[in-house]
Structure formats: C-alpha cells, structure tokens
Image (spheres, rainbow, N blue to C red):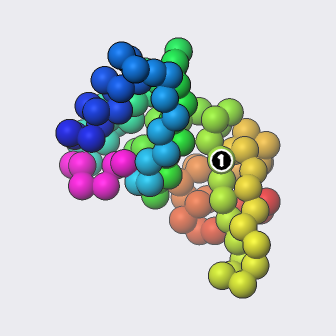
Amino acid sequence: MGCHLHFLVANKYYGPVFCFWDEPDNYISLSEVGHFVTSLRRSFKNSGQILATSHNEEAIRKFSDENTFVLDRKSHLEPTLVRLLSEITINGNLIDTLILGDIEL
C-alpha cells in the first residue's frame, strides 16, 4: 500500500498527475482489494487520471462500464481489439463471460 499512498499524495499536492499502474491489486489481500480500488477512484475523481490494468474480479467490478476498457485478441498473432465495456452486450455475469471468453468485440 506504500506506492498507493505516494500516488494519492502526489495527485493531491502536486497534481494533477497521470498514473499508469499495471495490476495495482497484486499482492493485496482479497478482503482489501475493494477498499483499495475505491480509494484510488475517489482520489482521482476530480483531479488527475489513473489507468490501471487488472485480472482481479473484485477490482473489475469496482469500475463502471463507462470507464472500463476490454482488451481482447483471438491469439498472440492477432491484433488486440479495444472496446469500452459499455459498448459490449454481456449476457449474464460479466466475470463469468470474461472467464469463458464469450465476449465478442
């Protein structure tokens, strides 16, 4: 959580900042992921921007469809397709659909 505090302080006192964080929820207990993501969202709501990647179900659920991008590709030889989650029709549970690979971009 130390890095997390650095970003919050930098954005508040030196900001606005742009933060790209690859899987910030790694090494955080499952019970803390929700609090962590909510804190990041709150901190960057009015100032600065954060771009985070995640494979964590709880972290994915904590962001709205309007600011969540889905990246997908058929194989490592194909280009990556990027779409806003709000533009994709999901039948059923988002996480189950992601796990099953049933999202069609």
Query: Is residue 102 at least partly visible in the picture?
Result: no
The structure residue drawn at horizontal position 40% and vertical position 45%, both measured from the top left corner, is: 58
Left/right of residue 68 with respect to residue 82 in the rendered view: left
Where is 70 relative to 9, above or below? Answer: below
- Report the residue marked by disc 1: 69
Left/right of residue 49 with respect to residue 58 in the rendered view: right
Q: Is residue 30 magenta?
A: no
| Image: magenta residue range | 24-29
The structure residue drawn at horizontal position 66% and vertical position 82%, both measured from the top left corner, is: 76
Quadrant housing residue 41: top left
Number of marks: 1
The residue lying toward the viewer, choosing from 71 and 2, is: 2
Task: Look at the image and tell me in which quarter the N terminus lies.
Answer: top left
Q: Residue 3, image x and y in percent?
A: 27, 41
The residue lying toward the viewer, choosing from 87 and 22, is: 22
Three-letter code for the amino acid on which mark 1 is drawn: Phe
Residue lying at the far bottom of the rendered structure: 77
Q: Residue 23, image x and y in percent?
A: 41, 54
The residue lying toward the viewer, choosing from 53 and 88, is: 53
Left/right of residue 32 with respect to residue 92 in the rendered view: left
Q: Main secondary structure of the magenta part?
A: loop
